[in-house]
Amino acid sequence: MKIIIYWNWEKTDNLTNKVKKILDNLWLLDLISIENSCDKNLKLELSIKKEPALIIEEEAIEFKDTIFEWIVPPESEIEAMITSIIWGSGDMSCAPTSCGSCSSSDACGV
């Protein structure tokens, strides 16, 4: 998975650093790459109207979408968004890839 921060300004560091901090807190920094882009083709492809925009791309399933644009939400909102994308229903007792021993009532047996 990749997070792309589209911003045609020089000041991308604030949002990039926020996202890196959140991924580090969630222990996902080594699993999810972050890049900055000002590619006009990307802007057209995703119909980005206002900057900045945070884009999630999952190459394995050919998914790419703009999660938010124009605002830089608080860290708690970005963290909730990433958590819901990674863990789906929000059940964080189970690993993102199943170990085979998870059920609705027990934690992961790994």
Image (tube, rainbow, N blue to C red):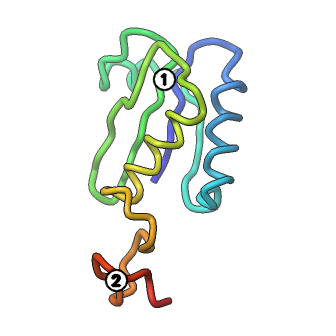
- Measured as percent of width and height from the top left, residue 44 is found at 33, 18
Could you tell me which residue is drawn at 29 percent across and 46 percent down?
A: 63
- Measured as percent of width and height from the top left, residue 57 is found at 39, 44
Circle 1 residue: 39
Left or right placement of residue 62 versus residue 57 in this view: left
Tag 1, which secondary structure? loop
Tag 2, which secondary structure? loop
Residue 21: numbered disc: none
- Measured as percent of width and height from the top left, residue 64 is found at 33, 40
Circle 2 residue: 102
Q: Which image quadrant for residue 92?
A: bottom left
Q: Which image quadrant for residue 49?
A: top left
Quadrant the N terminus occupies: bottom left
Q: Residues within 10 Å of mark 1 (few under 14, many from 20)?
A: few
Q: Amino acid at mark 1?
A: Asp
Instruction: Say which of 53 and 108 sits in front.
Output: 108
Left or right placement of residue 42 versus residue 46 in this view: right
Left or right placement of residue 8 versus residue 69 in this view: right
Q: Nearer the viewer, mark 2 or mark 1?
A: 2
Residue 25, placed above or below residue 65: below
- Mark 2 and mark 1: span between their CA atoms? 41 Å
Instruction: Say which of 54 and 99 sits in front.
Output: 99
Q: Amino acid at mark 2?
A: Cys
